[in-house]
Image (cartoon, helix red, strand yellow):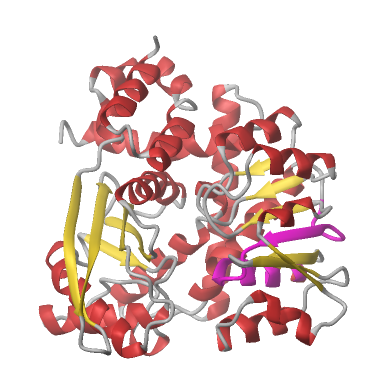
Amino acid sequence: MTYVEEVYAKLEKENPNEKEFLQAAKEILFSLQPVFDKHPEYQKASLLERFVEPERIIMFRVPWVDDKGVVQVNKGYRVQFNSAIGPYKGGLRFHPSVNLSILKFLGLEQILKNSLTTLPIGGGKGGSNFDPKGKSDAEVMRFCQSFMTELSRHIGADVDVPAGDIGVGGREIGFLFGQYKRLRDEYTGVLTGKGLTYGGSLGRKEATGYGLLFFVKEMLEYNGQKTQGKVAVISGSGNVAIYACEKATEMGMKVVAMSDSNGYIYDENGINLDVVKDIKEVRRARISEYVKAVPTAKYCEGCKGIWSIKCDIALPCATQNEIDEESAKLLVKNGVKAVGEGANMPSTLEAIEVFRANKILFAPAKAANAGGVATSALEMSQNSMRLSWSKEEVFEKLEGIMKGIHTNCAKACEKYGTGYDLVYGANIAGFEKVADAMMAQGIV
């Protein structure tokens, strides 16, 4: 049994019910064996055992009062996973599905994603099983204030800098920041994704979606292909999907489908993004409303069917494990040329193997969707310097970062002889930086 197999077996035994965390760990760990073959000193220092174990997990209750005066109680979490290269950095997710397994999987991925940006930020993740959907602004504010009352003692600009994620947008970040400032009596860059009037960065809203397309463009061009004229399918219709659609269209692609948790729309003429933005960003309605504004489009119930649409480029931007083995085979059968992950871990391990076996260009999330956290780190820099960059400056830096990530992933593939496999490339390139930092800092 190899060192990696031993560590994973122990992890499986100690965390038997954490399926999302084990899935992420398996995908990462088994691609790192070439690194340990070359660096036996890592094994001697039990580096992998330390890498997969969070430095700290904070769990707490979050009591709040709804508009009817009834006391509600939710669970709150912060997983401070690894601070070897900088303060913990990672989003807060407010969604009924949130549990420790999901946050540990996200936190583990975040370590490597943040490392790949080359910026000095460690990995963390947090959130709550609170659902902001259907809640009034006053209810969301009271929840956020209660959540931050506990979290505030564990975070700081040089300690842990949370951001938004599913269920945590500008409204929630504003309430969280206001409570932190009130409790700590300091005005500091402790959260990213803030409003532009109080320290936010231009371009943050677009960053993950734009970054995804910058990366996909690099991947295609590296393999002698172009974005121009490609047909794309994008799952989701939230922030990442909307701005992935915007940038894909700018790059000459035709996006023909988008979705939400109820179903998907297909518009053979190309998605009218202004209509989607009105539905999702203004009215906060369901994607099915699209066909009322564009009668020639079709709406289908259920999300999975979106992967049956013929396309050149598939961009899963909704949630984890949305592309399973069956969907991957369908995409391959219909001629897909490349897959770029905009969501976190949207492809199952079996789906990834299908893409590998069929030599489909595959951009894993930790590399392809790093644009959001990269721009969050740029926001941290702006906060520290008490200045603000123009949107053009931010996008220029973002594009440079995404190009650099692709270059480093490709170099890691070449260095370890894995062929052009960006799963190996991203995991190895991200891990090497963290590993060297951990070794330099001793047994901590």
* Of 411 and 238, the residue lying toward us: 238
Does residue 251 appear in the picture of this structure?
Answer: no
Q: Residue at x 60, y 22 (%)?
A: 417
Q: Nearer the viewer, residue 272 or 76?
A: 76
Residue 406 highlighted magenta (yes or no): no
Residue 285 falls left or right of residue 143? right
Question: Taking 370 as reference, is 57 left or right?
Answer: left
Residue 309 figure quarter: bottom right
Q: Which is nearer the eye, 219 or 25?
A: 25
Q: Is residue 193 above or below residue 300?
A: below
Residue 196 location, x and y as percent?
41, 86
In the rendered view, tell whether residue 151 sits above or below residue 66. Answer: above
Quadrant hosting residue 16: top left
Residue 314 seen in this snapshot: yes
- Residue 189 in the image: state x and y as whole percent: 27, 74
Q: Residue at x 83, y 39 (%)?
A: 333
Q: Which residues are magenta?
A: 226-249
Residue toward you, 149 or 217: 149
